Image (cartoon, rainbow, N blue to C red):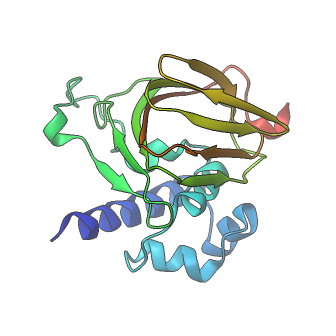
Amino acid sequence: MDHSSALNTHLATRLRDLRAENGLTLDGLADRTGVSRSMISLIERGESSPTATVLDKLAAGLGVTLASLFAEKDSAGASPLARRADQRVWRDPDSGYMRRNLSAPGFPSPIELVEVVLPAGARVAYDTGHRASVVHQQIWMIEGDIDLTLGDDTYHLGTGDCLSMRLDQPTIFRNQSERPARYVVALAIDTRAGPAGQR
């Protein structure tokens, strides 16, 4: 099984499991996320390579982070160490951006770390506003430059800059330079806040 097929199989299983945990039918998840029932069904059968935008909508509707769709289910016996060779890598078929899950798979932790490489000229838009959970995120630039639009505000981020944000507004990442940008994303779900819908 090639890398892409293995990832699609993992996403299929993970999405089915999370949907079941939330007690949602295909129609229920479709209503909650705006992603069509047929698209969700294709993803759950491993027959589609979904874009980052679609996966973000599904994650938001399920009350998890996008990174957690690529992770393993938490396990008390999971190792706290994630060797680079074992870290799951995924490339968005739409923009070509690459994300690497840095955190140890299945190890229970309130923090998730992801390394992202955004190609020169690439744009990734997440139009999800409402989320089932309150998610906090920080972006730390390792190299290159990006413009990040959060709602009505746009921030230019260069090497070494770090932006803290809450994922409750549409977000757009743009690399308008002529070289790739690389950054680390740290995510945490705020369990103290309760479901986002109850704020």
Q: Position of residue 20 (x, y in %)?
A: 52, 60
Residue 41's place in the image compared with 54, above or below, is below
Image quarter hosting the C terminus = top right
**Residue 91 quadrant:** bottom left
Along the viewing direction, whichever of 174 and 126 lies nearer the viewer: 174
**Residue 32 quadrant:** bottom right
Residue 71's place in the image compared with 135, above or below, is below
Would residue 158 appear left or right of 69 to someone viewing this image? right
Along the viewing direction, whichever of 55 and 171 lies nearer the viewer: 171
Query: Is residue 136 shown to the viewer in this render?
Result: no
Q: What residue is rendered at 37% in x and 27% in y?
A: 108
Q: What residue is rendered at 35% in x and 54% in y?
A: 90
Residue 58's place in the image compared with 68, above or below, is below
The single residue placed furthest to the front in the displayed view is 178
Q: Position of residue 189 (x, y in %)?
A: 59, 29
Along the viewing direction, whichever of 136 and 120 lies nearer the viewer: 120
Residue 188's place in the image compared with 1, above or below, is above
Along the viewing direction, whichever of 9 and 101 lies nearer the viewer: 101
Q: What residue is rendered at 63% in x and 63% in y?
A: 24
Q: Position of residue 54 (x, y in %)?
A: 59, 63
Would residue 196 appear left or right of 71 to someone viewing this image? right
Q: Position of residue 140 (x, y in %)?
A: 50, 22
Count of numbered labels shown in the rendering? 0
Would residue 53 appear left or right of 144 to someone viewing this image? right
**Residue 12 quadrant:** bottom left
Query: Is residue 131 shown to the viewer in this render?
Result: yes
Would residue 180 appear left or right of 169 to someone viewing this image? left
Image quarter hosting the N terminus = bottom left
